[in-house]
Amino acid sequence: MKIGSFLAYHLKAGVIGKAALRFERLRSKWKAGRKGTAGNDSLVPPLASRFRMKELISQQYLAGNYANGVKKVAWVASGAPVEILQALDYFVYFPDNHSALCGARRQAVEFATEAENAGYSRDICSYPRTEIGAFLTGRSPVGRIPKPDLIVCSNNICQTILQWYQVMAAYHKAQFVNIDTPFLYEGPKDHQIEYVQKQLEDLISIAERIAGKSLKYARLKEALRLGKEASELWLAILNRAQTKPSPLTAFDAFINMGPIVALRGQPETISFYRNMLKEVDERISKGVGAVKNEKARLLWDNLPIWYRLSWLSQLLAERGVNVVISNYTYGWGELAPLMDPLRPIESMARVYLMPYLNRSVQYKLQSMKNMVKDFDLDGVILHSDRSCKPYSIGQIDQRNELVNGLGIPAMLLEADHNDSRVFSEQQTKNRLEAFVEMLC
């Protein structure tokens, strides 16, 4: 390890960087406080937790700027077993999370265009086009992206991610590992769990060789325990939306989900979600709803439209509509009960087999029906996401089942989670206004 790299990592990203980001958080919170606490005519002020969330995510990206030469770096897909890499002290970078951030910052189209100019089709998901374009240009809103020593993904969320990460491994000449997960039409069978478990054990051997150290199972259990507690807190926060009026919106959840995706297994994530839960509970105790005049409550199906979160939230709130829950954010909490730190490998195999997208469309439909009942919902918006085909498949049938089976309104909204070139603001507004007329 070079002394210069060590000092840069611990001083610039550690002592100085953390102090600067803490100062920025306090300054932003103070400025927001000066603007008053009334919010606007339709929404109460956003949760103050967002300032700490931004600080945590910024710290992680800042550390990534200086990680090479100090730590081994692993790129990990959001649905891959990060706990093994955390226990081996890798610096972990999530390309999925970075692509979403580029979408929210409205830089995704700039990077996607560069990827398309290099020959990648616009029919490919906008996440890999964003990330490949960022790599080809060497630009990013978070500074320097750390070069990977190891790239780990799992095809438990889609097949595109497998090709995407293989491409990035080839660009960087990094070791590539995919955790192959059999698709589940019903609950996982013993032989399916054993199949994934064997692959996790192989991953440990590869990661140990690259890291130059042996895995300590006490550390793996601790990483899983921390991840489980963070997921339980996240689930508790989302379930608070069952309260009427709901103290938070699905858009609040989209904004604050970064730590549960990119920092699960870290003590700071637990502290963050404890404070967020406390803030949400304070709203409930005071009878404060996130939408001031909540008249209708909806479910959001699929990924968010990252570049129009605020616009959509405001448009619906002005009409008394609160999108209180999303099955996309719920997926990061609902598997928490399956995590067992005392049996880390087996329980990880079970958990990573069971994300929404590795299960049948019937399972997803039943989950949405359960949410309609549990959250006392009045309707459903199914985001037909041009990029995420696994999440969007079956939505027409699911919409019909919700309308005819449960008797509640449901609409398909066509867009893309990152590529704003396929989004029509006026058309979306017209469709949502017509849908809301049925609800309120």
Image: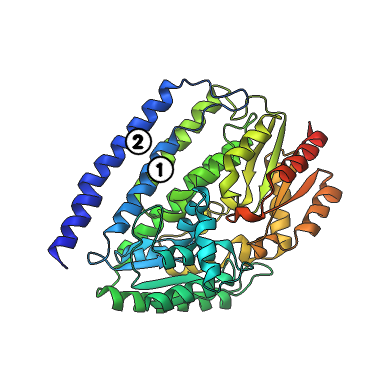
Residue 181 falls left or right of residue 378: left
Q: Mark 1 points at which residue?
A: 54
Dot 1 alpha-carbon crowd within 10 angstroms: few under 14, some 14 to 19, many 20 or more? some
Label 1's element? helix
Q: Are marks 2 and 1 in contact (CB under 8 Å)?
A: yes
Residue 60: x percent and y percent? 34, 52
Is residue 334 toward the left or the right of residue 294 in the image?
A: left
Q: Position of residue 244 (x, y in %)?
A: 65, 30
Which residue is located at x 54 percent, y 39 percent?
252
Up the image or down, 30 lies above or below 171; here it is above
Along the line of sight, which residue is nearer the eye, 201 or 253? 253
Which mark is drawn over residue 25?
2
* Picture quarter with the N terminus: bottom left
Residue at 20% x, 53% y is 10
Residue 222: percent from left, percent from top = 34, 58
Q: What residue type is labelled 1?
A: Lys
